[in-house]
Image (cartoon, helix red, strand yellow):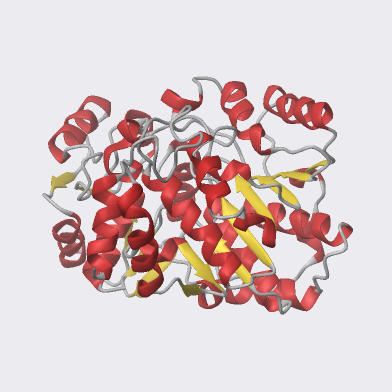
C-alpha cells in the first residue's frame, strides 16, 4: 500500500466533512472511546491543551505549540483541516507525521472498518456512531497514537467541530481554550450565539482552567461562567486581562484578528505558568516571531508576493472575514482585487455585503463538493448589490486573472473558504 492509497482509503472508507459536509457529521463519542480503549488510551501519556472556538483556533494552536517548543518541550500538534497534505494535521515539533506511519495505521485498521460484532471492535462500536468510523475519528486516533509513540511532553489539540460531542473531547487537558463565538455550523451547533457557546463550553472540564478569548456579549459570557461554575473550573477572560501591553515583540502572524488571538495566547500562557509549567518570556517572544517556521503554519494572512501585495487567508465566515476586509481596506492600495469562493453552508449573502464596494471580484469555486457553484455565488452577489466581477471555473484561473489585471500598487486577496486557499497553495506547489 502506498501513502496515496492509504490516504485515499481514509477518504473513501470514512466520510470526510470537508468534502461532503453534513452527511459526514456524527454526534457522540462512542466510536472514539472504543478506538481509544483498544489502543490503550494513548492521550493519557502526555499533557494536552484543548483549543475550541469559532475562529482563530488554528493560529492559537500553532502559536502555543511554538512557544512550548521554544521552551524546549517536545510538542505534538493536531489541527484541521489540512490545506495541501493530510499529514499537516499531525505534527511533532513542526515535523509532519511520516507517510510510512500513516500507511502502517491504515493497514492496522482497514480490515476492521466494518467488521461484524464478533470481531475487532465488538465493544461500544456503534453505540451512538454506527458500524463505521468517521474520517475524523480515525485521524484523531492516529494523532493520539503518534504523539504517544513520539513521547511528546505536550500535545496541542484543536477541536474539530463544536466541542461537547467532538471526538477530541475524550481528553482531560491541563488547559482548555475557547477562542471566540460567532455563527458557523449552525445546523449542528444551534442558531443562536448562546446555543453555540453551550456546545463549545462542552470542553470545559472539572477543575481544569479555561481561557475565553473574546467576549461576544453578556449572554455568551454567562454561558461560559455558568458552565465553569458548574464543574468547578477556574475561568479567565483574555480581553479583561490586558496582557498584550506587557510584551513588545515581533509577530509572524499579521492581521487585525491576530490582536484577539494574541490576548488569548498570553492569557493561556499565564494559566499554564500557574499550573507549574515553565514558560519563559524568551520562549513567548520566540514562539510569536517564529511560529510559521517552527510549526509549518500556512494560510493565515500569508503573504505570497510583495508587488502586487498578494495575500491569502483561510477566514471563511462572517466572524473571521469582517477583520480581513477591514484590514485590507486600511492598507494603501490603488485597487483591491478579491478572489473569493465559499462553501454552501455558510452565510454567503452577509459575507457578500461586507466586500468593499470598490473592489474587483473574481468569483470562483474550490474543488470540493461543498463548494458553492460559482454561478450561484455570482447570482447571490447580484441580488445584494451591483459591483464589478468576473466568473472563473476554478481557483487557479481566478488567481491568474487577478494577477493579469493588477498593477504593482494594487492588492490581491484570495480567500472566502479554507478550500479556496488549499486549491491555491496546491497550484503554487506550497
Residue under the point 32% across and 44% down = 16
**Quadrant of the snapshot with the N terminus:** bottom left
Q: Is residue 303 left or right of residue 63?
A: left
Q: Is residue 47 left or right of residue 386?
A: right
> Could you tell me residue 302's position as x and y percent?
42, 66
**Quadrant of the snapshot with the C terminus:** bottom left
Q: Is residue 67 left or right of residue 108?
A: right
Asked where in the image residue 405 lies, by quadrant, the reply is bottom left
Report whether residue 271 is seen: yes
Residue under the point 65% across and 73% down = 287
> Could you tell me residue 11's position as x and y percent?
27, 50
> Could you tell me residue 395's position as x and y percent?
20, 56
> Could you tell me residue 128's position as x and y percent?
47, 27
Residue closest to the eye, 347 or 22: 22
Report whether residue 315 is seen: no
Q: Looking at this view, name the residue that lies furthest to the front.
A: 118
Asked if residue 32 is positioned above or below residue 149 in the image, the reply reads above
Amino acid at each position: 500500500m502506498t501513502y496515496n492509497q492509504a490516504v485515499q482509503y481514509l477518504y473513501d472508507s470514512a466520510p470526510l466533512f470537508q468534502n461532503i459536509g453534513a452527511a459526514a457529521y456524527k454526534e457522540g463519542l462512542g466510536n472514539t472511546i472504543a478506538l481509544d480503549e483498544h489502543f490503550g488510551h494513548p492521550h493519557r501519556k502526555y499533557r494536552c491543551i484543548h483549543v475550541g472556538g469559532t475562529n482563530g483556533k488554528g493560529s492559537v494552536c500553532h502559536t502555543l505549540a511554538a512557544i512550548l517548543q521554544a521552551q524546549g518541550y517536545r510538542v505534538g500538534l493536531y489541527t484541521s483541516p489540512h490545506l495541501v497534505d493530510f499529514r499537516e494535521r499531525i505534527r511533532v515539533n513542526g515535523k509532519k507525521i511520516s507517510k510510512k506511519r500513516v500507511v502502517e495505521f491504515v493497514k492496522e485498521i482497514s480490515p476492521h472498518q466494518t467488521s461484524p460484532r464478533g470481531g475487532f471492535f465488538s465493544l461500544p462500536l456503534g453505540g451512538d456512531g454506527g458500524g463505521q468510523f468517521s474520517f475524523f475519528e480515525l485521524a484523531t486516533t492516529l494523532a493520539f497514537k503518534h504523539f504517544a509513540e513520539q513521547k511528546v511532553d505536550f500535545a496541542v489539540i484543536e477541536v474539530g467541530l463544536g466541542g461537547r460531542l467532538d471526538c477530541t473531547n475524550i481528553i482531560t487537558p491541563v488547559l482548555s481554550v475557547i477562542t471566540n463565538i460567532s455563527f458557523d455550523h449552525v445546523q449542528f451547533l444551534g442558531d443562536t450565539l448562546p446555543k453555540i457557546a453551550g456546545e463549545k463550553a462542552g470542553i470545559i472540564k472539572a477543575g481544569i482552567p479555561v481561557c475565553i478569548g473574546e467576549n461576544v456579549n453578556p449572554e455568551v459570557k454567562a454561558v461560559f461562567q455558568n458552565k465553569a461554575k458548574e464543574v468547578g473550573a477556574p475561568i479567565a477572560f483574555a480581553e479583561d486581562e490586558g496582557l498584550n501591553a506587557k510584551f513588545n515583540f515581533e509577530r509572524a502572524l499579521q492581521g487585525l484578528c491576530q490582536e484577539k488571538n494574541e490576548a488569548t495566547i498570553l492569557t493561556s500562557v499565564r494559566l499554564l505558568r500557574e499550573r507549574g509549567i515553565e514558560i519563559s518570556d524568551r520562549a513567548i517572544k520566540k514562539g510569536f516571531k517564529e511560529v510559521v517556521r517552527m510549526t509549518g503554519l500556512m494560510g493565515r494572512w500569508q503573504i505570497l508576493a510583495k508587488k502586487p501585495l498578494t495575500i491569502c487567508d483561510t477566514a471563511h465566515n462572517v466572524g473571521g472575514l469582517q477583520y480581513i476586509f477591514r484590514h485590507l481596506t486600511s492598507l494603501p492600495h490603488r485597487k483591491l482585487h478579491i478572489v473569493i469562493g465559499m462553501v454552501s453552508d455558510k452565510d454567503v449573502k452577509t459575507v457578500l455585503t461586507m466586500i468593499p464596494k470598490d473592489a474587483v471580484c473574481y468569483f470562483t469555486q474550490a474543488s470540493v463538493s461543498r463548494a458553492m457553484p460559482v454561478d450561484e455565488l455570482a447570482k447571490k452577489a447580484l441580488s445584494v448589490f451591483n459591483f464589478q466581477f468576473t466568473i472563473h471555473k476554478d481557483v487557479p484561473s481566478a488567481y491568474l486573472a487577478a494577477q493579469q489585471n493588477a498593477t504593482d500598487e494594487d492588492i490581491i486577496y484570495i480567500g472566502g473558504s479554507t478550500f479556496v486557499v488549499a486549491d491555491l497553495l496546491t497550484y503554487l506547489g506550497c
